[in-house]
Image (tube, rainbow, N blue to C red):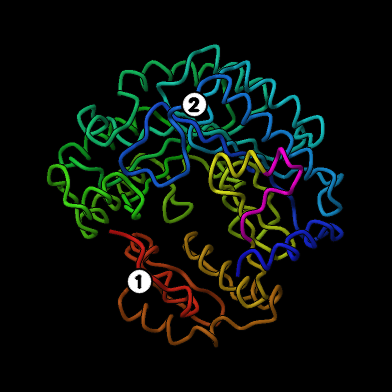
Amino acid sequence: MGEEDLPKARQALASPPNPASQLGLYLHIPFCRKRCKFCYFRVYTDKNADQIQTYLDALAREVEHYAQQPAIQGRPLHFVYFGGGTPSYISSRHLRALVERIKDVMPWDQADEIAFECEPGTLTKAKLETIRDIGVTRLSLGLENLNDEILHHNGRAHVSKEIYQAMPWVKELDFDQINVDLIAGMVGETWERWRETVQKTIDLDPDTVTVYQMELPYNTVYSKDLLSGDGEAIPLADWKTKRAWHAYAFEQFAAAGYTRSSAYTMQKTPEARFVYRDAVWTGQDMIGAGVASFSHMNGVHYQNAPRWDDYLGAIDGNDLPLHRAFATNRDEQLIRELILQLKLGTIDPAYFRAKFDADIIDRFGPVFSELRGEGLLNFDASSVSLTDEGLMRVDQMLPDFYEAKYCSARYT
Protein backbone atom coordinates (compact mmCIF):
# COMPACT_ATOMS: atom_id res chain seq x y z
CA MET A 1 0.00 0.00 0.00
CA GLY A 2 1.22 3.53 -0.62
CA GLU A 3 0.56 6.25 -3.15
CA GLU A 4 -2.30 4.26 -4.67
CA ASP A 5 -4.19 4.69 -1.38
CA LEU A 6 -4.04 8.48 -1.37
CA PRO A 7 -7.51 8.75 -2.96
CA LYS A 8 -8.86 6.71 -0.03
CA ALA A 9 -7.23 9.10 2.42
CA ARG A 10 -8.73 12.10 0.64
CA GLN A 11 -12.08 10.33 0.58
CA ALA A 12 -11.80 9.78 4.35
CA LEU A 13 -11.31 13.52 4.83
CA ALA A 14 -14.20 14.31 2.49
CA SER A 15 -16.59 11.96 4.29
CA PRO A 16 -19.05 13.08 6.97
CA PRO A 17 -17.64 13.11 10.51
CA ASN A 18 -17.82 9.88 12.46
CA PRO A 19 -20.21 10.58 15.36
CA ALA A 20 -18.75 7.68 17.37
CA SER A 21 -15.18 9.06 17.28
CA GLN A 22 -13.71 12.05 19.06
CA LEU A 23 -11.14 14.22 17.28
CA GLY A 24 -7.59 15.01 18.30
CA LEU A 25 -4.80 17.14 16.85
CA TYR A 26 -1.09 16.30 16.90
CA LEU A 27 1.38 19.09 16.08
CA HIS A 28 4.93 18.00 15.23
CA ILE A 29 7.63 20.47 16.26
CA PRO A 30 10.78 18.81 14.87
CA PHE A 31 13.50 21.01 16.38
CA CYS A 32 16.08 20.10 19.03
CA ARG A 33 19.23 21.61 20.53
CA LYS A 34 21.04 18.31 19.92
CA ARG A 35 20.15 14.92 18.46
CA CYS A 36 20.24 12.23 21.13
CA LYS A 37 22.30 9.22 20.11
CA PHE A 38 19.29 6.92 20.66
CA CYS A 39 16.77 9.16 18.86
CA TYR A 40 14.88 7.73 15.86
CA PHE A 41 12.42 10.61 15.25
CA ARG A 42 12.42 13.20 12.47
CA VAL A 43 14.23 16.13 14.11
CA TYR A 44 16.44 19.02 13.00
CA THR A 45 19.26 20.70 14.94
CA ASP A 46 20.46 23.09 12.22
CA LYS A 47 17.51 25.44 11.57
CA ASN A 48 17.67 29.17 12.26
CA ALA A 49 14.81 31.40 13.42
CA ASP A 50 13.69 32.24 9.87
CA GLN A 51 13.59 28.57 8.87
CA ILE A 52 11.65 27.74 12.01
CA GLN A 53 9.14 30.46 11.14
CA THR A 54 8.81 29.08 7.61
CA TYR A 55 8.04 25.65 9.01
CA LEU A 56 5.54 26.93 11.57
CA ASP A 57 3.75 28.90 8.84
CA ALA A 58 3.46 25.68 6.83
CA LEU A 59 2.21 23.82 9.90
CA ALA A 60 -0.51 26.43 10.45
CA ARG A 61 -1.51 26.34 6.79
CA GLU A 62 -1.83 22.56 6.94
CA VAL A 63 -4.16 22.78 9.93
CA GLU A 64 -6.16 25.50 8.17
CA HIS A 65 -6.54 23.14 5.21
CA TYR A 66 -7.72 20.27 7.40
CA ALA A 67 -10.19 22.48 9.25
CA GLN A 68 -12.13 22.96 6.01
CA GLN A 69 -12.55 19.23 5.31
CA PRO A 70 -16.03 17.73 5.85
CA ALA A 71 -14.75 15.01 8.21
CA ILE A 72 -13.27 17.70 10.49
CA GLN A 73 -15.12 20.96 9.94
CA GLY A 74 -16.84 22.20 13.09
CA ARG A 75 -15.84 19.21 15.24
CA PRO A 76 -14.63 20.06 18.75
CA LEU A 77 -11.15 18.93 19.69
CA HIS A 78 -10.87 16.23 22.35
CA PHE A 79 -7.12 16.73 22.77
CA VAL A 80 -4.12 18.57 21.33
CA TYR A 81 -0.60 17.17 21.56
CA PHE A 82 2.57 19.17 20.90
CA GLY A 83 5.23 16.56 20.15
CA GLY A 84 8.69 16.50 18.69
CA GLY A 85 11.47 16.98 18.53
CA THR A 86 11.26 19.54 21.27
CA PRO A 87 8.20 21.81 21.26
CA SER A 88 9.73 23.88 24.06
CA TYR A 89 12.71 24.66 21.80
CA ILE A 90 10.83 27.30 19.80
CA SER A 91 10.57 30.86 21.13
CA SER A 92 7.57 32.22 23.01
CA ARG A 93 6.96 34.57 20.08
CA HIS A 94 6.88 31.67 17.62
CA LEU A 95 4.66 29.62 19.88
CA ARG A 96 2.08 32.35 20.51
CA ALA A 97 1.82 33.17 16.80
CA LEU A 98 1.38 29.52 15.86
CA VAL A 99 -1.30 28.93 18.47
CA GLU A 100 -3.21 32.06 17.49
CA ARG A 101 -3.47 30.91 13.88
CA ILE A 102 -4.45 27.35 14.72
CA LYS A 103 -7.05 28.29 17.33
CA ASP A 104 -8.70 30.60 14.80
CA VAL A 105 -9.74 27.53 12.77
CA MET A 106 -9.65 24.71 15.36
CA PRO A 107 -10.28 26.17 18.83
CA TRP A 108 -9.37 24.03 21.82
CA ASP A 109 -10.64 25.95 24.84
CA GLN A 110 -13.03 23.08 25.64
CA ALA A 111 -10.57 20.25 24.94
CA ASP A 112 -10.02 17.68 27.68
CA GLU A 113 -6.24 17.85 27.39
CA ILE A 114 -3.53 20.03 25.85
CA ALA A 115 -0.25 18.14 26.21
CA PHE A 116 3.19 19.64 25.60
CA GLU A 117 6.63 17.97 25.53
CA CYS A 118 9.61 19.82 27.04
CA GLU A 119 13.37 19.44 27.28
CA PRO A 120 14.41 20.93 30.64
CA GLY A 121 17.30 22.98 29.27
CA THR A 122 15.02 24.93 26.92
CA LEU A 123 12.80 26.21 29.73
CA THR A 124 12.76 29.63 31.33
CA LYS A 125 10.08 30.92 33.63
CA ALA A 126 8.83 33.23 30.86
CA LYS A 127 8.57 30.38 28.36
CA LEU A 128 6.70 28.22 30.87
CA GLU A 129 4.30 31.10 31.43
CA THR A 130 3.69 31.20 27.67
CA ILE A 131 3.10 27.45 27.61
CA ARG A 132 0.61 27.81 30.46
CA ASP A 133 -1.08 30.79 28.78
CA ILE A 134 -1.81 28.87 25.56
CA GLY A 135 -3.84 26.40 27.59
CA VAL A 136 -1.46 23.50 28.22
CA THR A 137 -2.82 21.16 30.89
CA ARG A 138 -0.33 18.29 30.73
CA LEU A 139 3.36 19.20 30.75
CA SER A 140 5.70 16.33 29.95
CA LEU A 141 9.38 16.72 30.86
CA GLY A 142 11.94 14.52 29.12
CA LEU A 143 14.31 13.93 32.03
CA GLU A 144 15.40 10.45 30.84
CA ASN A 145 18.00 10.23 33.63
CA LEU A 146 19.39 12.36 36.45
CA ASN A 147 23.03 11.36 36.13
CA ASP A 148 25.01 13.95 34.18
CA GLU A 149 27.59 11.49 32.86
CA ILE A 150 24.83 9.32 31.38
CA LEU A 151 23.02 12.34 29.93
CA HIS A 152 26.23 13.53 28.28
CA HIS A 153 27.24 10.12 26.92
CA ASN A 154 23.81 9.58 25.33
CA GLY A 155 23.81 12.97 23.65
CA ARG A 156 21.16 14.70 25.75
CA ALA A 157 21.29 18.49 25.55
CA HIS A 158 20.37 19.15 29.18
CA VAL A 159 22.05 18.41 32.50
CA SER A 160 20.47 17.69 35.87
CA LYS A 161 21.04 21.26 37.09
CA GLU A 162 18.55 22.47 34.48
CA ILE A 163 15.96 19.98 35.70
CA TYR A 164 16.18 21.33 39.24
CA GLN A 165 16.11 24.89 37.98
CA ALA A 166 12.91 24.34 36.00
CA MET A 167 10.89 22.26 38.45
CA PRO A 168 10.04 25.09 40.92
CA TRP A 169 8.73 27.21 38.02
CA VAL A 170 6.68 24.27 36.76
CA LYS A 171 5.14 23.69 40.19
CA GLU A 172 4.48 27.40 40.72
CA LEU A 173 2.46 27.63 37.48
CA ASP A 174 0.16 24.85 38.69
CA PHE A 175 -0.28 22.79 35.54
CA ASP A 176 -3.10 20.28 35.84
CA GLN A 177 -0.66 17.43 35.39
CA ILE A 178 3.13 17.10 35.33
CA ASN A 179 4.63 14.01 33.72
CA VAL A 180 8.30 13.06 33.61
CA ASP A 181 9.93 10.51 31.31
CA LEU A 182 12.74 8.14 32.21
CA ILE A 183 14.58 5.61 30.05
CA ALA A 184 15.82 2.33 31.51
CA GLY A 185 18.96 1.10 29.81
CA MET A 186 20.67 4.24 28.58
CA VAL A 187 24.32 3.69 27.71
CA GLY A 188 26.41 3.89 30.88
CA GLU A 189 23.59 2.86 33.21
CA THR A 190 24.37 0.79 36.30
CA TRP A 191 22.23 -0.51 39.14
CA GLU A 192 23.67 2.11 41.51
CA ARG A 193 23.01 4.99 39.12
CA TRP A 194 19.51 3.72 38.25
CA ARG A 195 18.50 3.45 41.90
CA GLU A 196 19.69 7.02 42.43
CA THR A 197 17.75 8.32 39.40
CA VAL A 198 14.57 6.56 40.54
CA GLN A 199 14.79 8.02 44.03
CA LYS A 200 15.53 11.52 42.74
CA THR A 201 12.51 11.23 40.44
CA ILE A 202 10.29 10.26 43.36
CA ASP A 203 11.63 13.28 45.25
CA LEU A 204 10.54 15.54 42.35
CA ASP A 205 6.96 14.40 43.06
CA PRO A 206 5.48 14.40 39.52
CA ASP A 207 1.86 13.43 38.90
CA THR A 208 2.85 10.67 36.50
CA VAL A 209 6.08 8.93 35.57
CA THR A 210 6.60 7.22 32.23
CA VAL A 211 9.43 4.68 32.04
CA TYR A 212 10.60 3.43 28.67
CA GLN A 213 13.15 0.74 27.92
CA MET A 214 15.94 1.82 25.58
CA GLU A 215 15.25 0.75 22.00
CA LEU A 216 17.61 1.24 19.07
CA PRO A 217 16.01 1.20 15.60
CA TYR A 218 18.48 1.21 12.75
CA ASN A 219 18.41 4.99 12.15
CA THR A 220 19.90 5.98 15.52
CA VAL A 221 23.48 7.17 15.95
CA TYR A 222 24.23 4.25 18.26
CA SER A 223 22.85 1.68 15.80
CA LYS A 224 24.75 3.13 12.87
CA ASP A 225 27.98 2.96 14.86
CA LEU A 226 27.28 -0.63 15.90
CA LEU A 227 26.44 -1.76 12.37
CA SER A 228 29.40 0.02 10.77
CA GLY A 229 31.92 -0.93 13.42
CA ASP A 230 32.93 2.70 13.80
CA GLY A 231 33.63 4.42 17.08
CA GLU A 232 34.18 2.98 20.53
CA ALA A 233 32.42 -0.10 21.85
CA ILE A 234 28.95 0.68 23.22
CA PRO A 235 28.10 -1.10 26.49
CA LEU A 236 24.42 -1.89 25.94
CA ALA A 237 22.31 -3.47 28.66
CA ASP A 238 20.51 -6.62 27.56
CA TRP A 239 16.72 -6.88 27.64
CA LYS A 240 16.72 -8.90 30.85
CA THR A 241 18.62 -6.15 32.63
CA LYS A 242 16.47 -3.38 31.19
CA ARG A 243 13.31 -5.18 32.29
CA ALA A 244 14.80 -5.61 35.76
CA TRP A 245 15.54 -1.88 35.98
CA HIS A 246 12.03 -1.09 34.71
CA ALA A 247 10.49 -3.43 37.28
CA TYR A 248 12.59 -1.93 40.08
CA ALA A 249 11.42 1.57 39.17
CA PHE A 250 7.77 0.54 39.24
CA GLU A 251 8.25 -1.19 42.60
CA GLN A 252 9.75 1.97 44.06
CA PHE A 253 7.06 4.24 42.61
CA ALA A 254 4.40 1.88 44.00
CA ALA A 255 6.02 2.06 47.43
CA ALA A 256 5.85 5.87 47.13
CA GLY A 257 2.09 5.73 46.50
CA TYR A 258 1.90 5.52 42.72
CA THR A 259 -0.29 3.02 40.84
CA ARG A 260 0.21 1.54 37.39
CA SER A 261 -1.91 2.91 34.53
CA SER A 262 -0.15 1.17 31.62
CA ALA A 263 2.91 -0.88 30.80
CA TYR A 264 4.96 2.31 30.93
CA THR A 265 3.22 4.74 33.28
CA MET A 266 2.71 5.13 37.02
CA GLN A 267 0.30 7.75 38.35
CA LYS A 268 0.10 9.43 41.74
CA THR A 269 -3.67 9.94 41.88
CA PRO A 270 -6.66 8.23 40.23
CA GLU A 271 -7.52 11.56 38.58
CA ALA A 272 -4.31 11.60 36.53
CA ARG A 273 -5.09 10.86 32.89
CA PHE A 274 -3.33 10.77 29.55
CA VAL A 275 -6.10 11.60 27.10
CA TYR A 276 -3.88 11.55 24.00
CA ARG A 277 -2.61 8.05 24.75
CA ASP A 278 -6.00 6.56 25.54
CA ALA A 279 -7.66 8.18 22.51
CA VAL A 280 -4.99 6.96 20.08
CA TRP A 281 -4.96 3.49 21.59
CA THR A 282 -8.73 3.12 21.11
CA GLY A 283 -8.74 4.17 17.46
CA GLN A 284 -10.10 7.71 17.79
CA ASP A 285 -9.76 10.13 14.87
CA MET A 286 -6.58 12.21 14.92
CA ILE A 287 -5.10 14.74 12.54
CA GLY A 288 -1.31 14.91 12.54
CA ALA A 289 0.27 18.08 11.17
CA GLY A 290 3.94 18.56 10.37
CA VAL A 291 6.79 16.76 8.65
CA ALA A 292 6.60 12.95 8.99
CA SER A 293 3.52 13.13 11.25
CA PHE A 294 0.74 10.57 10.94
CA SER A 295 -3.05 10.74 11.04
CA HIS A 296 -5.97 8.39 11.48
CA MET A 297 -9.34 9.29 9.99
CA ASN A 298 -12.35 7.09 9.25
CA GLY A 299 -10.25 3.93 9.24
CA VAL A 300 -7.44 5.28 7.07
CA HIS A 301 -3.89 5.87 8.35
CA TYR A 302 -1.73 8.31 6.45
CA GLN A 303 1.61 9.97 6.90
CA ASN A 304 3.02 13.29 5.78
CA ALA A 305 6.13 13.68 3.66
CA PRO A 306 9.11 12.56 5.76
CA ARG A 307 11.60 15.21 4.64
CA TRP A 308 11.80 18.97 5.10
CA ASP A 309 11.83 20.02 1.43
CA ASP A 310 9.10 17.56 0.40
CA TYR A 311 6.82 18.67 3.20
CA LEU A 312 7.28 22.40 2.62
CA GLY A 313 6.93 21.88 -1.13
CA ALA A 314 3.63 20.11 -0.70
CA ILE A 315 2.30 22.95 1.44
CA ASP A 316 3.55 25.61 -0.99
CA GLY A 317 1.83 23.75 -3.82
CA ASN A 318 -1.47 23.69 -1.94
CA ASP A 319 -1.37 19.92 -2.20
CA LEU A 320 -2.54 17.84 0.74
CA PRO A 321 0.87 16.80 2.12
CA LEU A 322 0.34 13.07 2.14
CA HIS A 323 3.33 10.88 1.45
CA ARG A 324 1.70 7.49 1.88
CA ALA A 325 -1.59 6.14 3.11
CA PHE A 326 -2.81 2.81 4.42
CA ALA A 327 -6.50 2.07 4.00
CA THR A 328 -7.18 -0.42 6.77
CA ASN A 329 -9.95 -2.97 6.86
CA ARG A 330 -11.94 -3.85 9.97
CA ASP A 331 -9.69 -6.78 10.77
CA GLU A 332 -6.56 -4.63 10.72
CA GLN A 333 -8.29 -2.03 12.88
CA LEU A 334 -9.17 -4.73 15.42
CA ILE A 335 -5.57 -5.96 15.60
CA ARG A 336 -4.28 -2.40 15.93
CA GLU A 337 -6.55 -1.68 18.87
CA LEU A 338 -5.85 -5.04 20.47
CA ILE A 339 -2.07 -4.61 20.52
CA LEU A 340 -2.31 -1.02 21.71
CA GLN A 341 -4.69 -1.94 24.52
CA LEU A 342 -2.36 -4.72 25.61
CA LYS A 343 -0.05 -1.90 26.68
CA LEU A 344 -2.70 -0.80 29.17
CA GLY A 345 -2.42 -4.20 30.82
CA THR A 346 -6.08 -5.27 30.56
CA ILE A 347 -8.49 -5.95 27.70
CA ASP A 348 -12.25 -6.36 27.85
CA PRO A 349 -13.40 -8.88 25.19
CA ALA A 350 -16.88 -7.35 25.36
CA TYR A 351 -15.43 -4.14 23.86
CA PHE A 352 -14.34 -6.03 20.74
CA ARG A 353 -17.61 -7.92 20.49
CA ALA A 354 -19.53 -4.63 20.60
CA LYS A 355 -17.26 -2.66 18.24
CA PHE A 356 -16.10 -5.36 15.79
CA ASP A 357 -18.56 -8.21 16.34
CA ALA A 358 -15.52 -10.38 17.02
CA ASP A 359 -14.60 -12.88 19.73
CA ILE A 360 -10.94 -12.20 20.50
CA ILE A 361 -10.77 -15.12 22.94
CA ASP A 362 -11.80 -17.52 20.22
CA ARG A 363 -9.59 -15.95 17.56
CA PHE A 364 -6.43 -15.45 19.62
CA GLY A 365 -6.94 -18.30 22.09
CA PRO A 366 -3.79 -20.20 21.03
CA VAL A 367 -1.64 -17.06 21.38
CA PHE A 368 -3.18 -16.20 24.76
CA SER A 369 -2.62 -19.78 25.92
CA GLU A 370 1.04 -19.71 24.91
CA LEU A 371 1.61 -16.39 26.66
CA ARG A 372 -0.18 -17.67 29.75
CA GLY A 373 2.16 -20.67 29.75
CA GLU A 374 5.09 -18.26 29.81
CA GLY A 375 3.58 -16.43 32.79
CA LEU A 376 2.92 -13.25 30.82
CA LEU A 377 -0.88 -13.00 31.04
CA ASN A 378 -4.08 -14.55 32.34
CA PHE A 379 -7.37 -14.77 30.49
CA ASP A 380 -10.86 -16.20 30.48
CA ALA A 381 -14.02 -15.52 28.48
CA SER A 382 -14.55 -12.12 30.08
CA SER A 383 -11.07 -10.62 30.50
CA VAL A 384 -7.42 -10.57 29.51
CA SER A 385 -4.85 -9.21 31.94
CA LEU A 386 -1.08 -9.06 31.75
CA THR A 387 1.05 -10.12 34.67
CA ASP A 388 3.76 -7.82 36.00
CA GLU A 389 6.29 -9.77 33.93
CA GLY A 390 4.03 -9.44 30.89
CA LEU A 391 3.87 -5.68 31.29
CA MET A 392 7.65 -5.53 31.38
CA ARG A 393 7.80 -7.50 28.12
CA VAL A 394 4.70 -6.20 26.35
CA ASP A 395 6.57 -4.86 23.30
CA GLN A 396 8.19 -8.24 22.80
CA MET A 397 4.83 -10.05 22.65
CA LEU A 398 3.01 -7.66 20.28
CA PRO A 399 4.26 -9.28 17.03
CA ASP A 400 2.49 -12.50 18.09
CA PHE A 401 -0.74 -10.75 17.10
CA TYR A 402 0.44 -9.17 13.83
CA GLU A 403 -0.46 -10.50 10.41
CA ALA A 404 2.54 -12.35 9.03
CA LYS A 405 3.26 -9.73 6.38
CA TYR A 406 3.82 -7.08 9.08
CA CYS A 407 6.30 -9.08 11.16
CA SER A 408 9.91 -8.06 10.67
CA ALA A 409 13.07 -7.48 12.71
CA ARG A 410 13.49 -3.82 13.53
CA TYR A 411 15.93 -3.28 16.37
CA THR A 412 19.66 -3.70 16.86
Q: Are marks 1 and 2 in contact (CB under 8 Å)?
A: no
Q: Identify which residue is drawn at 26% across, 46% down.
A: 222
Please state if 43 lies on the left or on the right of 372 as rendered. right
Taking the magenta stretch, the answer to whether it contains residue 403 is no
- Residues drawn in magenta: 314-324
Residue 238 found in image quarter: bottom left
Please state if 80 lies on the left or on the right of 346 as rendered. right
Quadrant of the frame with the N terminus: bottom right
Residue 137 is situated, as x and y percent measured from the top left of the image, at 62, 31
Mark 2 = which residue? 47
Gap between marks 1 and 2, in whole Å? 46 Å
Callout 1 amino acid = Leu
Residue 127 is situated, as x and y percent measured from the top left of the image, at 55, 16
Residue 52 found in image quarter: top right
Q: Which comes sooner in the sequence, label 1 or label 2? A: 2
Residue 6 is situated, as x and y percent measured from the top left of the image, at 70, 62
Quadrant of the frame with the C terminus: bottom left
* In this view, 42 is above or below 96: below
Q: Identify which residue is drawn at 47% across, 60% down.
A: 343
Residue at disc 1, secondary structure = loop
Q: Identify which residue is drawn at 46% across, 80% down.
A: 404
Residue 90 is situated, as x and y percent measured from the top left of the image, at 54, 23
Please state if 47 lies on the left or on the right of 25 as rendered. left
Q: Nearer the viewer, residue 98 or 379?
A: 98
Q: Nearer the viewer, residue 358 or 18?
A: 18
Residue 376 has which mark?
1
